[in-house]
Image (cartoon, coloured by chain):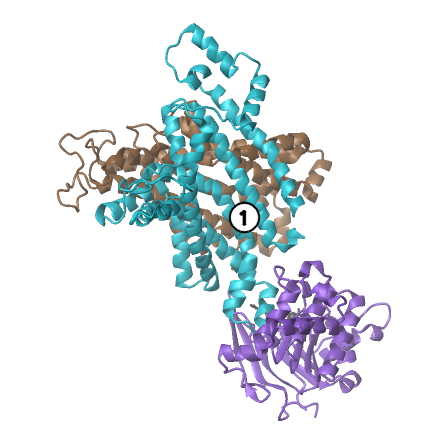
Chain colours: A purple, B cyan, C brown
């Protein structure tokens, strides 16, 4: 399934290194992945396994201390690695959009949410200000924010975390992106809100025919949303499979560990944790078609 | 917003009363007889002494004296200069525009250079540009400005002969003050060359007075920007495909300005302290020089009144800065 | 020694308390020095400052002439490298024929003395008042903080100027005035630190163990809020030197013929367009001293307050 021609996003052999005071840190190590249009790919892995960093590399959002290397990074067949910054900005935010883990911190506290969405539209479309306003109201309604017209002039601190994440989603889908990257979109939210946001993301993905990359720790989220899963550990890709086969026959011990950490799989009176399992770090290559 | 303003105003009242007590106590703490000090007369008849004593009310208990002092203040009576025999408030009001003009041009210069320089240093942190700029800022921050002024005079007035040494405008020009701002008045006067003369008189004092605020603002802007550039919302702005100019100049700077505005507010005291030195060096006829001269002439009525008026100005400016802070920080406004 | 202790935990536990503390103090000092020495400017500042201290101490040995001796026939002599300069007066002479270099060397004594006295007075008074305000809160606190607000409502130099007008011009009075104007900063810092430390567990523990108010304030709480105070002390050391020089320049500080740098500038002012050296060097001395201390202050802040550390 991967490396198929005509994939929406096709990353080959991506590595990211950070120059730190303590030497070079390899946060992502030779990861290849691809997403098709209309497909949902989940990336799972424990904290620090380089999930965010690899996606930030795609977006070109890493700080200057990061060195990004890849054999190719094709978006709609075009290598976005070698684009000039200005050309890349035409794609980022328009055709590829990203939402982040901390919705409240991700919105600028000094500007109204309406302004922050309007700015995206202004950047990437030729709509008039009237049309942009209508579009923003439409987007707010699409992400389930009632009284959309009034909310345009609200500041982020006047909204809850869930509402802020809806605003972030509205902002991300403002220009009808082909690919939406969601980096743990529900981790910082209340359990009750998490489900709503996930449902919203899935329904938008279906409705808009987007490809989506969903980063998460949560196998439950994977089961609910994803078509295909990549398991990442310490910057390396451990396993890649479609959801059903992954849940039925996890190949890599680390994946097994993640799965058994699901509450449904709890045995006895204690949840197993990943560290209960001992495994070698070699990726299970070629185990899947 | 109005409530915010009023609550801040209410907080100032006890401070103002305290400041008035300080000014009130000043004349009584001075060694020597307060009547002699206030009247500035050497050797007077017993009769005249009694007359003055009841005029100033020194024969009454302290709290009654203070009460009279306060009622006078509230009616705009800040005392009378011993030397010129003019009301202190009137002298203050004629001289204050000169200080205001100088301070405003200094703070505008400091902001206009300090903020962009701080932003650039933060964006290029660690570069030679950053190091040079921050080194220069530290030198500026450590500068004895009275010496700096003299150096500039040596260079620009002495060696190059570009700028005049003192005053607000060349003696060739004379016109009645309209706004009190020499730059504006010289334009209004329509006399050819007057404006140019006013500008050339203003340049050096402005640079001298702006030096320390400029250094402080540049340093503060840099550190605020460094903090803000790591925030999630800056990453969001970049993820929208906005050009760096907009990400830094709008999204980051807008947030970084919040602490910078506080810093700018704190510079008012620095400016007025600096005005004392700058005006002395350049013979600038403002309230700083007025205060120094009065201390030397032992015109204690002026010192007393000026002390109070200057403290009042600082408090008012701080109030304005507080309100501005509320305006640019939505989290306070709502 | 240190390494054996860390290798063998029993040894450390078994050691007497004093030794353990000494070791940890040495470790802390080493850590402090590591961070401080990371800052190149701070290290340079430190060296310059040490040099100035040495100059001040050995002034009588270093100075080629007496700072107050008036050399007839050598009025306003330019520095050696200028035409008409003379090797016995390297930086030239002033209007009454005194050697500028010697006066500058002796001036270092005054500036450092001013800094030390002002900071000690301001720190001790400020800490005491701040401790009282932060520890007892209530009406005491309100009154103290109001008074500090009032002091801070005046521009510091103006207040110092007026205080000197009351006390009479002179170096000692100038120092008193500057110390008075500076101590609100220490009061505020100490009070804030005390208030945040007071609720901590270790203070409660000490209180439960029966520590009295005074002991709590000075032995338990104060040592834990020294970092911001030290940084502030460095800042106000340089501010004191600047303010004293400014007062001297205005004729309200040290009085002639004291070779205080600000006073020297005041005396030199009328020769500004004729003899640049009498104006340039004293100010340069002030700038270098203040700059060195401020460089050190920045390094201290980086080393002592990790929260303020910027990448
Ligand atoms: N700016 C940076 N500088 C240095 N190292 C970094 C930087 N950003 C990330 N890293 C390092 O890269 C590694 C991968 O981080 P990343 O944020 O991708 O983890 P993650 O898988 O997203 O974890 P989480 O689930 O907690 O979000 C971590 O070890 C992290 O410390
Ligand atoms: Mg992450």
- Measured along the vertical axis of the image, is residue A210 above or below residue A131? below
Q: Is residue B328 left or right of residue A142?
A: left
- Measured along the vertical axis of the image, is residue A82 above or below residue C33? below
Q: Position of residue A150 (x, y in %)?
A: 72, 63
- The image quadrant that residue B90 belongs to is top left
Q: Quadrant of ligand 1?
A: bottom right
Q: Is residue C297 left or right of residue A252?
A: left
Q: Position of residue A68 (x, y in %)?
A: 53, 77
Q: Is residue C237 left or right of residue C21?
A: left
Whether residue A190 appears in this view of the structure is yes
- Measured along the vertical axis of the image, is residue B146 above or below residue C304? above
Q: Position of residue A89 (x, y in %)?
A: 54, 77
The residue under label 1 is B262
- The image quadrant that residue B241 belongs to is bottom right
Residue in the foreground of this view, choosing between B88 and A251: B88
**Residue at the image point whose x is 52% and y is 28% from the top:** B76
């Amino acid at each position: 399934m991967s490396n198929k021609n005509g994939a929406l996003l096709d990353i080959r052999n991506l590595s990211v290194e950070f120059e730190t005071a303590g030497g070079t840190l390899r946060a992502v190590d030779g990861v290849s992945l691809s997403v098709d249009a209309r497909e949902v790919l989940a990336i799972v892995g424990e904290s620090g396994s380089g999930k965010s960093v690899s996606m930030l590399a795609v977006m070109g959002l890493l700080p200057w201390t990061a060195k990004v290397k890849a054999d190719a990074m094709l978006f709609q067949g075009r290598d976005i690695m070698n684009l000039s910054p200005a050309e890349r900005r035409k794609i980022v935010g328009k055709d590829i959009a990203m939402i982040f883990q901390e919705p409240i911190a991700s919105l600028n506290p000094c500007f109204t949410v309406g302004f922050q969405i309007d700015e995206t539209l202004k950047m990437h479309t030729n709509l008039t200000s009237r049309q942009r306003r209508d579009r923003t109201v439409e987007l707010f309604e699409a992400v389930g924010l009632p009284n959309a017209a009034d909310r345009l002039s609200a500041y982020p601190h006047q909204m809850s975390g869930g509402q802020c994440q809806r605003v972030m989603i509205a902002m991300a889908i403002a220009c009808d992106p082909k690919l939406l990257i969601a980096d743990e979109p529900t981790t910082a939210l209340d359990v009750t809100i998490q489900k709503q946001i996930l449902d919203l993301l899935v329904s938008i993905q279906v409705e808009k025919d987007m490809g989506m990359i969903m980063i998460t720790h949560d196998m439950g989220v994977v089961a609910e949303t994803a078509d295909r899963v990549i398991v990442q550990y310490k910057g390396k890709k451990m396993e890649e499979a479609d959801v059903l086969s992954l849940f039925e026959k996890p190949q890599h011990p680390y994946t097994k560990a993640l799965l058994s950490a699901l509450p449904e799989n709890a045995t006895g009176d204690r949840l197993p944790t990943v560290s209960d399992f001992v495994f070698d770090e070699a990726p299970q290559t070629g185990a899947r078609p | 917003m109005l409530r915010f303003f009023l609550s801040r105003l209410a907080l100032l009242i006890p401070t103002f009363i305290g400041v008035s007590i300080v000014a009130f106590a000043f004349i009584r703490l001075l060694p020597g007889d307060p009547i002699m000090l206030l009247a500035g007369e050497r050797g007077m008849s017993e009769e005249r002494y009694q007359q003055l004593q009841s005029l100033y009310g020194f024969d009454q208990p302290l709290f009654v004296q203070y009460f009279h002092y306060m009622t006078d203040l509230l009616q705009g009576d800040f005392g009378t200069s011993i030397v010129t025999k003019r009301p202190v408030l009137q002298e203050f009001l004629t001289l204050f525009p000169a200080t205001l003009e100088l301070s405003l041009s200094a703070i505008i210069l400091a902001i206009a250079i300090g903020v962009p320089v701080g932003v650039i240093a933060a964006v290029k942190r660690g570069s030679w540009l950053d190091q040079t700029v921050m080194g220069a800022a530290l030198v500026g921050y450590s500068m004895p400005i009275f010496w700096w002024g003299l150096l500039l005079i040596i260079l620009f007035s002495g060696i190059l002969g570009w700028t005049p040494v003192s005053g607000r405008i060349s003696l060739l020009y004379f016109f009645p003050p309209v706004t009190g701002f020499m730059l504006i008045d010289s334009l209004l006067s329509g006399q050819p060359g007057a404006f140019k003369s006013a500008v050339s008189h203003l340049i050096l004092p402005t640079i001298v007075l702006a030096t320390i605020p400029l250094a402080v603002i540049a340093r503060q802007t840099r550190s605020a920007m460094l903090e803000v550039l790591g925030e999630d919302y800056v990453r969001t702005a970049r993820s929208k495909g906005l050009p760096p100019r907009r990400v830094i100049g709008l999204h980051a700077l807008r947030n970084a300005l919040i602490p910078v505005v506080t810093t700018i507010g704190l510079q008012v005291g620095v400016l007025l302290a600096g005005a004392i030195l700058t005006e002395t060096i350049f013979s600038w006829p403002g309230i700083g020089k007025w205060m120094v001269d009065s201390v030397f002439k032992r015109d204690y009525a002026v010192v007393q009144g000026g002390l109070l008026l200057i403290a009042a100005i600082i408090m008012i400016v701080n109030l304005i800065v507080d309100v501005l802070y509320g305006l640019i920080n939505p989290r306070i406004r709502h | 020694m240190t390494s054996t202790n860390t290798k063998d935990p029993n040894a450390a536990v078994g050691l007497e308390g004093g030794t353990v503390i000494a070791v940890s103090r040495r470790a802390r000092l080493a850590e402090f020095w590591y961070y401080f020495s990371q800052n190149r400017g701070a290290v340079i500042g430190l060296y310059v400052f040490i040099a100035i201290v040495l100059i001040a101490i050995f002034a009588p040995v270093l100075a080629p002439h007496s700072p107050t001796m008036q050399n007839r026939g050598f009025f306003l002599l330019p520095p050696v490298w200028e035409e008409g300069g003379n090797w016995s007066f390297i930086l030239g002479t002033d209007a009454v024929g005194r050697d500028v270099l010697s006066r500058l060397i002796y001036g270092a004594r005054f500036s450092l003395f001013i800094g030390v006295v002002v900071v000690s007075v301001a720190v001790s008074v400020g800490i005491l008042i701040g401790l009282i305000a932060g520890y007892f809160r209530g009406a005491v606190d309100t009154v103290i903080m109001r008074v500090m607000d009032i002091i801070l409502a005046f521009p510091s130099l103006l207040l110092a100027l007026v205080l000197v007008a009351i006390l009479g011009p002179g170096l000692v009075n100038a120092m008193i005035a500057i110390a008075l104007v500076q101590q609100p900063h220490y009061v505020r810092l100490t009070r804030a630190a005390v208030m945040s430390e007071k609720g901590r567990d270790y203070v409660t523990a000490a209180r439960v163990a029966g520590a009295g108010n005074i002991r709590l304030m000075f032995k338990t709480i104060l040592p834990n809020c020294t970092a911001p105070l030290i940084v502030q002390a460095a800042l106000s050391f340089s501010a004191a030197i600047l303010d004293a020089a400014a007062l001297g320049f205005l004729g309200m500080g040290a009085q002639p013929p004291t070779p205080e740098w600000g006073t020297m500038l005041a005396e030199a002012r009328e020769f500004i367009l004729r003899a640049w050296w009498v104006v340039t060097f004293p100010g340069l001395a002030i700038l270098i001293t203040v700059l060195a201390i401020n460089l050190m202050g920045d390094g201290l802040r980086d080393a002592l307050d990790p929260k303020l550390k910027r990448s």
